[in-house]
Amino acid sequence: MAAGSKHADVSPPVFLQLAGNPVRWRLLTELARSDLRVGELVAAIDQPQNTVSYHLGRLRAAGLVSMRRSSADHRDSYYHADLNRCGELLASTGAALHPGLSTAVQPALTVRRTRIRNRNARKVRVLFLCTGNSARSQMAEALLARAAGEYAEVASAGSHPKELHPNAVRAMRAYDIDLTGRRSKHLDEFAGRRFHHVITLCDKLREICPEFTGSPETAHWSIADPAAEGGYAAFRRVAADLHTRIVFLTHYLGIPTTTATPTTPTTPTTRE
């Protein structure tokens, strides 16, 4: 044993202190897949609401979980796991045990993989939904299609389609993606079609989302409508959020890592 090592700090790294608690680990695994409300987390992990709220508070204080008010009901809130932050802390946890482990941890909190994914399987089919199909879902569709390539079939639609927003087109150009000429679709166009995953991006649409044939796996990403805020900066923030989520989604879907690297922005994110 090296001299002085017995006097070293032997406290577990921050991530272990936080995620090592069984309740907090369950919360993280649920939120790694989908943004959820407190009541849904209570049901998912079978714990009292005050217990769930306490541990969510601990995770929020550490920056592992964030919260935003629901656009469908402002009395409600959605919680979201910051997987980048989880990845950073996991990496530092490995380094605390041994320097050789500092880059061994992948920055993704993957809770389970789709069973259909392998090189010989059919393509995974993913549908993104929001109200207008004019920004968020179109951007998500384009980002995943770019990242997944031949390994996925991706579509998007809305409950009340509106014309594609010009700022959505502009924001995607920063990722070398051209949305020019794409049309918005009503979700009825996909009635009867089978998807493996259906992801809602709008709190309001989640409340009215119909059931799809084949019981696809569903998830919700609570993302504010950039058109409601106004200005290009809101679209740029949504694009960055979607880009991050798509990176982790490709890992979740089991898409090869050589493919699953969406193009990063080519323009600086300056304040406007």
Image (cartoon, rainbow, N blue to C red):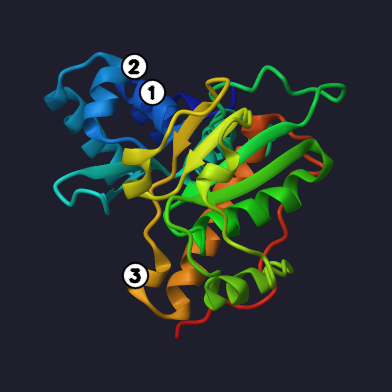
Q: Is residue 188 above or below residue 212?
A: below
Residue 13 in view, yes or no: no
Q: Which residue is mark 2?
A: 22
Give the residue displayed 51% in from the left and 71% down from the top.
Answer: 236
Q: Secondary structure at mark 2?
A: helix
Give the residue displayed 52% in from the left and 73% down from the top.
Answer: 165
Give the residue displayed 66% in from the left and 54% down from the top.
Answer: 143
Q: Amino acid at mark 2?
A: Pro
**Mark 2 or mark 3, which is nearer to you?**
3
Of residue 209 and residue 1, the one placed in the foreground of this image is: 209
**Residue 10, percent across and down?**
41, 26
Q: Which residue is mark 1?
A: 25
Q: Is residue 266 above or below residue 190?
A: below
How much space separates mark 2 and mark 3, taking CA atoms? 39 Å
Q: Amino acid at mark 3?
A: Ala
**Residue found farthest to the bottom:** 272
**Residue 203, percent across and down?**
33, 47
Q: Earlier in the sequence, mark 3 or mark 1?
A: 1
The quarter of the picture where the N terminus appears is top right
Q: Which residue is mark 3?
A: 228
Residue 208 in view, yes or no: yes
Q: Is residue 257 above or below residue 110?
A: below
**Mark 3 or mark 1, which is nearer to you?**
3
Give the residue displayed 23% in from the left and 22% down from the top.
Answer: 42
**Residue 37, percent across and down?**
27, 36
Q: Amino acid at mark 1?
A: Trp
Q: Are marks 3 and 1 in contact (CB under 8 Å)?
A: no
Q: Secondary structure at mark 1?
A: helix
